[in-house]
Image (cartoon, rainbow, N blue to C red):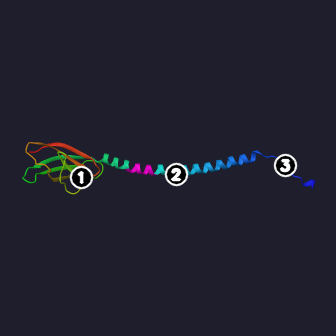
Amino acid sequence: MAWFKVKSRKVKGISYIFSVMLMTLIISSLAAGVLLWGMGVVNRSQASYDIIFEKKIERVKERLVVEDVKFELTPDPDQIHIYVRNVGAIPLTINRVYVNHEPAETPLNVSLGIGEGESIIVDSPIALEQGETYLIKVATARGKTVSGYWTAS
């Protein structure tokens, strides 16, 4: 059987090349998975930041002016008439009024369209005296505030 004699070749480099190629394939597939996961995380955080920035932009677009304040000094309760106007680029909702940093009872959410004005009547949380100056602060639902000092007459 000399014609069927297999020559023994010592091939040493092939198994090493295959192992390196296999490890490269495994590492590349794992890296692709990590890359896709990371892109998903970044995409979700960008979407949440978009919502936050949109709310901040809306707050900047809100403009509110207190045009006049009149005090009605009647016994129990003292009332304050506040005339406000929306001069901003978007509609707004007034939900809080403060007198000297004390929250006043306000009508439920006064909505103002662009350019609209309205008189808000609130019961004063503190006793008012004629000739005294009071800080009046009006706040919107988005958190925009406008304040000023007015003297009761």
Residue 68 counted in the magenta span: no
The C terminus sits in image quarter:
top left
Left or right side of 95 for 49: right
Q: Residue furthest right?
A: 2
Identify the amino acid type marked 1: Ile
Q: Which mark is residue 112?
A: none
The N terminus sits in image quarter:
bottom right
Dot 2 or dot 3: first in sequence order is 3
Numbered disc 1: secondary structure: strand
> Mark 3, residues whose alpha carbon is within 10 Å: few (<14), some, or many (≥20)?
few
- The rendered magenta stretch, by its main secondary structure, is classed as helix
**Marks 2, 1: nearer the viewer:** 2
Residue 47 counted in the magenta span: yes
**Tag 2 near tag 1, CB within 8 Å:** no
Q: Give the residue at x 90% y 55%.
A: 4
- Give the spatial CA distance, label 2 vs label 3: 49 Å
Q: Which residue is mark 1?
A: 94
Q: Give the residue at x 68% y 48%.
A: 21
Q: Which residues are magenta?
A: 44-51
**Tag 3 near tag 1, CB within 8 Å:** no
Q: Residue 105, image x and y in percent?
A: 18, 54
Q: Residue 149, image x and y in percent?
A: 16, 42
**Tag 2 near tag 3, CB within 8 Å:** no
Q: Residue 97, image x and y in percent?
A: 20, 50
Q: Which residue is mark 3?
A: 8
Dot 3 or dot 1: first in sequence order is 3
Image position of 121 with respect to 150: above or below: below
Identify the amino acid type marked 2: Trp
Left or right side of 141 for 1: right
Numbered disc 2: secondary structure: helix
Q: Which residue is mark 2?
A: 37
